[in-house]
Image (tube, grey):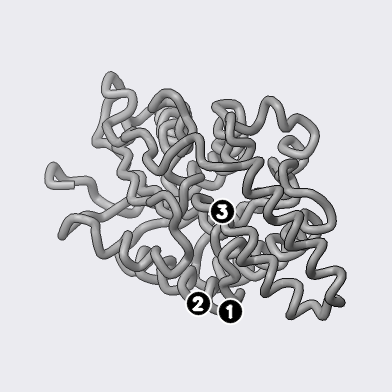
Amino acid sequence: MGRTRLPILLGATALTAGFAVGGRVLLTRQAAIARRRIGKPLGEDSLDADRIWRRSLDGEPIELLVLGDSLAAGLGAARRKETLGGRIAKGLAVRLHRPVRLRTAAVVGSESPDLDAQLDGLAAGYRPDVAVIVVGGNDVTHRLPVATSVRHLDAAVRRLRALGAEVVVGTCPDLGSLRPVPQPLRRIVSSLSRRLAIAQTDAARLAGAEPVDLRRSVGPMFFDEPEQMFSLDRFHPSALGYRRTAEALLPAVCRGAQRSVRTRPHSASR
């Protein structure tokens, strides 16, 4: 997710949805309230969790790449093993009995168009076995057109597939779970995030990735247990929130890694 620009989102949403002037004034006030409630107590930097997880296991490490926004980067986690990448890497190593080398290219505040730069920043010759993309929250709050979001997601998946990587896409979470955002603004962002998640699902499948619907798999937990699932900013996941999100993604990541390690030779240079 990353930086929240709800007032900006609000202005465009109200206009495009055809709200009356009174409705726009109400929503503008609510957006200001949400901005004050959320703030940015976590800052802009996430923990560096990149390393080989479970070195004690035998075999060449599975190369795991994580791209996307602050959720993918693990902003708010207090320890490396609590980040989304750390959780997935550890779980993957345990399930496949192989060490996992994590590379996190996700950047706090990113939107779907930033995926291209994240891929450009990888070392020459780097070839992931499996890549996880989680992006979309900032696309919604920053009013990015759905067509633009899915175009960049499609391009990122196809670039990764061209490298021989299996790809898992965690679709946009339901932003309606953000309690600091008052109604009816919360219903609006919920609807917009749901629309983006559906489009991401279709785009991911067409490009050769396996989508995971985070709205359905973990969304109800964030709605029902916000005190446990959110960090202190009430916007990013807590350690438990990251754990549940990783658990939702892990089966697809394991399937992808298994396909990759069966078909690709592992050399000492990887």
Q: Is residue 88 above or below residue 198?
A: above
Q: CA distance from mark 2 to mark 1?
A: 6 Å
Q: Residue at x 49, y 42 (%)?
A: 254
The single residue placed furthest to the top in the displayed view is 56
- Left or right position of 53 against 225: left
Q: Nearer the viewer, residue 203 or 67?
A: 67
Q: Return the disc, 2 or 3, that comes first in the chain's sequence.
A: 3
Three-letter code for the amino acid on which mark 3 is drawn? Thr
Question: At numbered mark 2, what does the secondary structure look like: helix, strand or loop?
Answer: helix
Question: At numbered mark 1, what does the secondary structure look like: helix, strand or loop?
Answer: helix
Label 2 Cα crowd, 10 Å radius (few <14 / some 14-19 / many 20+): some
Q: Which mark is residue 151?
A: 2
Q: Which one is closest to the eye, mark 2 or mark 3?
A: 3
Label 1 Cα crowd, 10 Å radius (few <14 / some 14-19 / many 20+): few
Q: Which one is closest to the eye, mark 3 or mark 1?
A: 3
Q: Residue at x 57, y 58 (%)?
A: 5
Three-letter code for the amino acid on which mark 2 is drawn? Arg
* x and y percentages locating residue 101 in the rendered image: 29, 37
Disc 2 and disc 1 in contact, CB within 8 angstroms: yes
* x and y percentages locating residue 260 in the rendered image: 38, 51
Q: Residue at x 47, y 35 (%)?
A: 42
Disc 3 and disc 1 in contact, CB within 8 angstroms: no
The residue pinned by badge 3 equals: 4
The residue pinned by badge 1 equals: 147
Label 3 Cα crowd, 10 Å radius (few <14 / some 14-19 / many 20+): many
Q: Nearer the viewer, residue 197 or 58?
A: 197
